[in-house]
Image: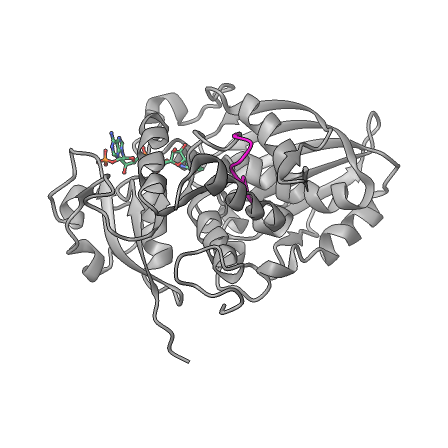
Amino acid sequence: MNRPRVPVAVLGATGAVGQTFVRLLRRHPFFELREVAASQRSAGRPYREAVHWLEGELPDAIGDLEVRPCTPEAVRSRVVFSALDASVAGEVEASFARAGATVLSNARAYRMDDDVPLVIPEVNASHLALVRRQRRVRSWEGAIVTNANCATTVLALSLAPLHEAAGVRTAFVATLQAASGAGYPGVPSLDLLGNVVPYIAGEEEKIEVEASKILGRLEDFAVAPAAIRMSVHANRVPVEHGHTVCVTVELNRAVEPEEASELWRRWRGHPLCHGLPSAPDPPLALCDDPDRPQPRRDVWAGHGMRVLVGRVRPDPVAHLRFAALGHNTVRGAAGGSVLNAEVMGRMGLLPDVKEGAW
Ligand code: NAP
């Protein structure tokens, strides 16, 4: 059946995440990419000239679009994907929500606000109901819905089945984060080639609080964060795409590697995601080989939307150890946002989309 597609825009369309949006949206069955917007440096130019296109072919029809400035007067779509630089996202995204647009944001500005959903839909689609509180409290016709920091996404997805079954009490986490996670041009090559940088500004704090909000429970239109004690080391490594997290967990009861593996194997995530175009089936997969997952070999699993778990073993201090890998600009950013929008459409939370139509 041919249904009319919802017109959408991408803000920050020239950056690393913005380009990923363009690739994911160009043939989307529910959304039609009508507008691209970026800074004043790019506005007014054809997209193909303004963008430093990073991967594969730039679709002709998108290359011809004129880049708009990031204002609600210049961008008319009522569904807006934001890949804006964090320094400007706060103000710009609010101006769109005030003007009636539903903004699906990748920036950190609103993630921890009480009335803003921070969503990985397989884990906490129910938190999207916060949009109704947000509209009431802020008197916005539109809304802001966020997805998590890219490393948080990999961590929270891998913890979800364990948390649902046995309650995670403590998590020690070391991340190995790809270069593309810093955007384009990102970290200078001479700082990163043949090197590991044991510092990513603000990252450890973000992962600690965001994972607890995502794994928390929605009670009376507020999220009670999961009571997980978390200790994170964030590292930048010379990998192109794919964030790895090495995790040691203590649970509320002992869980053997065999039981944990079965939990990961069986987990299908929230039913609202099932069958949607961007939802990987299954959302998690278990690697049997002892030396996997690896970014070079595994990062495109499920078109970059599946998180892989491996190296599951007992831990002599806590209960379990494992490694997990996910694509940072797809699962951890643009693809996550697009899936949020698909679920919102299914729930009747997008303009002009009837509940259940998708
Ligand atoms: P990026 O490559 O640096 O791209 C930034 C984008 O923001 C560009 O399109 C840029 O446009 C635009 N921009 C900058 N200043 C602006 C202004 N004053 N007004 C309007 N637009 C402006 O960054 P990125 O890696 O794609 O990240 C985008 C957002 O996603 C950030 O908030 C980041 O924290 C978040 N995020 C990134 C990842 C990842 O893996 N990279 C994962 C999760 C979340 P011009 O080209 O015109 O300058």
Location of residue 53 with respect to 3 vertically, above or below:
above
Residue 231 x %, y %: 66, 22
Residue 267 at least partly seen: yes
Magenta segment, prevailing SS (helix, strand or loop): loop
Q: What colour scheme was applied to this rendering of the protein?
A: one colour
Q: Residue furthest right?
A: 254
Residue 253 x %, y %: 88, 36
Location of residue 324 with respect to 340 vertically, above or below:
above
Give the side of residue 20 with respect to residue 117, left or right. Answer: left
Taking the spot 61% from the left edge, 55% from the top edge, the residue there is 283
> Looking at the figure, which quarter contains the N terminus?
bottom left
Taking the spot 46% from the left edge, 31% from the top edge, the residue there is 110
Q: Nearer the viewer, residue 150 or 237?
A: 150
Give the side of residue 64 with respect to residue 241, left or right. Answer: left
* Residue bounds of the magenta highlight: 113-120
Displayed quadrant of residue 162? top right
Q: Residue furthest bottom?
A: 1
Q: Nearer the viewer, residue 340 or 48?
A: 340
Residue 236 is a magenta residue: no
Taking the spot 51% from the left edge, 44% from the top edge, the residue there is 131
Taking the spot 35% from the left edge, 67% from the top edge, the residue there is 5
Location of residue 56 with respect to 329 vertically, above or below:
below
Ligand 1 sits in which quadrant?
Answer: top left
